[in-house]
Image: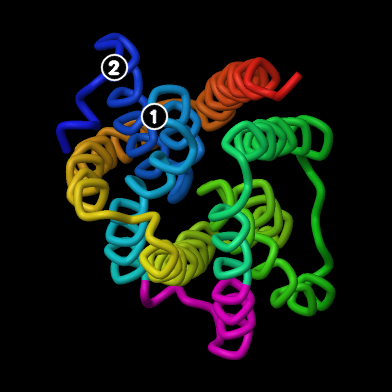
C-alpha cells in the first residue's frame, strides 16, 4: 500500500480521479471503468501494477452488476461460449504479461485504446447479423480475455463485439458483466500463479473498488440526464488523449 502512495502527488491524484471517472462511466454505460483507470494508473505505476490493482474492483463491481441484471441474461449456451473463450484468453494474456517488457505492454495498451476510439468513430452504426454474432461468441470471448490478461483492457474486443450485436441495454449490461467477471476471475488467479498480484496490490484494489463504487451512482444519475451522444463523445476524447499519452511514454521507453 505504501508503494502506491509514492510518486508525484499530482499524478497520484490524476490516477484516483481516473478510477472514480471509470466508475462514473460504468454507472452510466454498464462498462468501461478499466478503459479510464488502467491507462491513468499505468502512467503513474506502470502496466503491471495498474493491471494488478484493478483486478479486485473489476471483479467485484461486475459481479454485483451481473446480479442486478440477472433477469436480462441471454441463453446459457451463448453465454457459455463467451465465458469459456474469456477463461482461455485471460490465461494466455497473463502469460504474455509475465514475460513482455513494460514498454511493449504500454505500446499494446496504447494501440488497444486508440483502436477502440478509431473503431467507434469509423463504424458508429456497424451491426453484426444475429447468427454470425452468436457464432463468433467463442473467439470474441478469447480475444477479449487475452487483451484483459495482457493489458487489463478488453474493451477493444469485447465492447466492440457486444455493441455490434445491438443487444437491448439490459441484456448488454448483464452479458458484459458476466463476461468481465469471468475474465477478471481467471486473470486474478493467473496473476497469483505468476506472482504478479502480491498482497499490497491486492489490498490496494479495495481502495480502487471504493472509488469505482463511489462513481457508479454518479454515472447512473448523469446517464439519466445527459445526452448519450455528448457523454459518448467526451469519453472518446478522453480516451484518445490517454492513448496518445501512453503511446508517447512507450516510445520514449523503447530501447535504442
Give the image's coloring scheme. Answer: rainbow
184 relative position to 211: left or right: right
Does 120 sit above or below residue 250? below
Residue under label 1: 45
Q: Nearer the viewer, residue 23 or 19?
A: 19
Residue contact at pointers 1 and 2, CB within 8 angstroms: yes
Residue 178 visible in the picture: no
The furthest residue to the bottom? 77
Judge whether residue 224 is colored magenta: no
Magenta-highlighted residues: 70-88
Q: Nearer the viewer, residue 95 or 80?
A: 95
Circle number at residue 7:
2
Lower position in the chain sequence, tag 1 or tag 2: 2
Judge whether residue 79 is colored magenta: yes
Residue 70 visible in the picture: yes
165 relative position to 41: left or right: right
Q: Determine the residue positioned at 56% across, 52% down.
A: 97
The furthest residue to the front? 256
- Badge 1 marks a residue whose secondary structure is helix
Does 256 sit above or below residue 68? above
- Badge 2 marks a residue whose secondary structure is loop
- Please tell me how crowded label 1 is: few (under 14), some (14-19), or many (20+) other residues with Cα within 10 Å: some
Q: Nearer the viewer, residue 47 or 186?
A: 47
Q: Determine the residue positioned at 74% across, 72% down.
A: 139
User: Residue 221: x, y in percent?
Assistant: 29, 35
217 relative position to 47: left or right: left
The quarter of the image holding the N terminus is top left
Amino acid at each position: 500500500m505504501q508503494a502506491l502512495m509514492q510518486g508525484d502527488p499530482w499524478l497520484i491524484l490524476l490516477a484516483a480521479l481516473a478510477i472514480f471517472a471509470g466508475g462514473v462511466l460504468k454507472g452510466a454505460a454498464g462498462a468501461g471503468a478499466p478503459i479510464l483507470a488502467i491507462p491513468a494508473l499505468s502512467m503513474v505505476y506502470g502496466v503491471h501494477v495498474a493491471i494488478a490493482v484493478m483486478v479486485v474492483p473489476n471483479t467485484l463491481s461486475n459481479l454485483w452488476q451481473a446480479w442486478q441484471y440477472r433477469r436480462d441474461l441471454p441463453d446459457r449456451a451463448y453465454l457459455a461460449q463467451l465465458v469459456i473463450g474469456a477463461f482461455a484468453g485471460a490465461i494466455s494474456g497473463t502469460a504474455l504479461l509475465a514475460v513482455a517488457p513494460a514498454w511493449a505492454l504500454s505500446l499494446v495498451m496504447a494501440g488497444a485504446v486508440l483502436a477502440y476510439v478509431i473503431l467507434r468513430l469509423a463504424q458508429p452504426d456497424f451491426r453484426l447479423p444475429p447468427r454470425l454474432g452468436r457464432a463468433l461468441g467463442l473467439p470474441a470471448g478469447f480475444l477479449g480475455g487475452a487483451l484483459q490478461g495482457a493489458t487489463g483492457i478488453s474493451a477493444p474486443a469485447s465492447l466492440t463485439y457486444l455493441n455490434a450485436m445491438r443487444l437491448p441495454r439490459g441484456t448488454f449490461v448483464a452479458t458484459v458483466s458476466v463476461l468481465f467477471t469471468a475474465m477478471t476471475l481467471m486473470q486474478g488467479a493467473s496473476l497469483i500463479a505468476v506472482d504478479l498480484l502480491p498482497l499490497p496490490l491486492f489490498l490496494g484494489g479495495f481502495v480502487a473498488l471504493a472509488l469505482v463504487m463511489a462513481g457508479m451512482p454518479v454515472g447512473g444519475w448523469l446517464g439519466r440526464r445527459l445526452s448519450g451522444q455528448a457523454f459518448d463523445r467526451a469519453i472518446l476524447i478522453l480516451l484518445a488523449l490517454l492513448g496518445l499519452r501512453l503511446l508517447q511514454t512507450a516510445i520514449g521507453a523503447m530501447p535504442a
